[in-house]
Amino acid sequence: MAKVALITGVTGQDGSYLAELLLEKSYTVHGLLRRASSFNTGRIEHLYQDPHEPNPRLYLHYADLTDGSRLVTLLEGIHPDEVYNLAAQSHVRVSFDEPEYTGMATGLGSTRLLEAIRMIGLDCRYYQASSSEMFGASTPPQNEQTPFWPRSPYGISKVYSYWMTRNYREAYGMFAVNGILFNHESPRRGLTFVTRKITRAVAEIAAGKRDALYLGNLDAVRDWGYAPEYVAGMWAMLQHTEPGDYVLATGTAYTIRDFLGFAFSHVGLDWEKYVRFDERYLRPAEVDSLIGDASRAASILGWTPKVMTPELARIMVEADCAAV
Ligand code: NAP
Ligand code: G4F
């Protein structure tokens, strides 16, 4: 029997790559779709299957992580073998503007899903999209033993979801795991995250469509990997015999300045001529340095990343140049 998976956040960067991976592995995939007045399915357009066609394997359902009763009816109807909870208000800067909503979606959303699974007695494996933002101000390199010191409403909401996931594992014996993922990017990254904001600007500047890029803090250090490799790690966590928590990261460290250098140099431009400062992009509290140690995932799951940040920047710039 083909396995059945439910992905919340299927319309996001990771959800779209995970849906692709699971369809390749012959899963039937159900995705949770937020109702919006305009289409929000751009990242999964190429996977969409008309439900009138014979044997569709991708199904989309209207639901929202803030609506617990809907999650119950959805899970009861689908009976998934694996649930990947990727949905979140995932923007750190925005979480300072909307701390309450971020708590409701990114924090309590996981509880609604875990509780729905428990209430209907569903026997499934659960993946929680935890984040390196939970480490916040803790000194790098960070691994599964590093204390959490979140620095934003987003990071705090993710810490809450992390512990709820562990609690459902410990209290109810649920196969529930946390993937603590460091930043991972791709041509499908949202346009307001710094890497994609940079690569889209590089493409537009190279095409003569604009002449400036406004950014905030250029000194933060991040460990940027390639999203398709990270969703493979999510899947591997749910295939292991025992549930556990794993860091996924490249172990490399670059500043925003470094990324600017990689991205602009691909089109032969000097970033310092185009980048301007705008304080609107600063955060009330910054996470200065995230550098992950993924040795546990390497030794137990055999997961190792191949694409490092300079190559990632090339992939993203080329995709944006082609699109522009
Ligand atoms: P993303 O592109 O921002 O996608 C977020 C997804 O969540 C979208 O499908 C969005 O739907 C959905 N969503 C937001 N609020 C929702 C709600 N209230 N109910 C239902 N769905 C909702 O994020 P991503 O980069 O793919 O990241 C996936 C997950 O991993 C997130 O939980 C994120 O916090 C976490 N994470 C990401 C990274 C990273 O570097 N990318 C690192 C660590 C952890 P719409 O399309 O309708 O907006
Ligand atoms: O690209 P960012 O917005 O990503 P951030 O804050 O690291 O969060 C991302 O990674 C987390 C994993 O660690 C995820 F959990 C989270 O969901 C999200 O995917 O910002 C990266 C850095 C920050 O230090 C920020 O201050 O870039 C700096 N930055 C400088 N100028 C900017 C800008 N960030 C954004 N978004 N926009 C700017 O103009």
Image (cartoon, grey):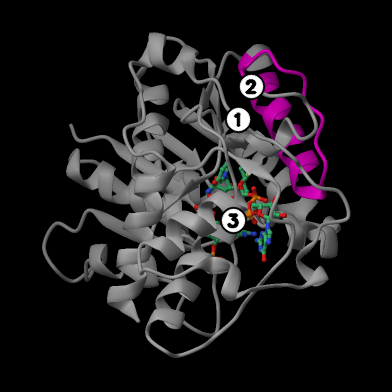
Residue 313 sits in quarter: bottom left
Q: Position of residue 230 (x, y in %)?
A: 41, 37
Corner quadrant of residue 130: top right
Above or below — where is 219 with respect to 117? below
Q: Which mark is residue 70?
A: 3
Q: Which mark is residue 141?
A: 2
**SS of the residue at dot 2?**
loop
- What residue type is disc 3 on? Arg
Q: Nearer the viewer, residue 262 or 303?
A: 262
Label 3 or label 1, whichever comes before in sequence order: 3
Q: Which residues are magenta?
A: 143-169
Q: Residue at x 45, y 90 (%)?
A: 209
* 282, above or below 6, in the image: below
Using the numbered discs, state the Cα–Cα distance from disc 2 to disc 1 in whole angstroms. 5 Å
Q: Amino acid at mark 1?
A: Ile
- Contact (Cβ within 8 Å) of mark 2 with mark 1: yes
Q: Which mark is residue 207?
A: none
- The quarter of the image holding the C terminus is bottom left
**Residue 27 drawn in magenta:** no
Callout 1: SS? loop
Q: Is residue 229 left or right of residue 212?
A: left
Q: Main secondary structure of the magenta part?
A: helix
Quarter where residue 36 is shown: bottom right
Mark 2 to mark 3 CA distance (whole Å): 40 Å
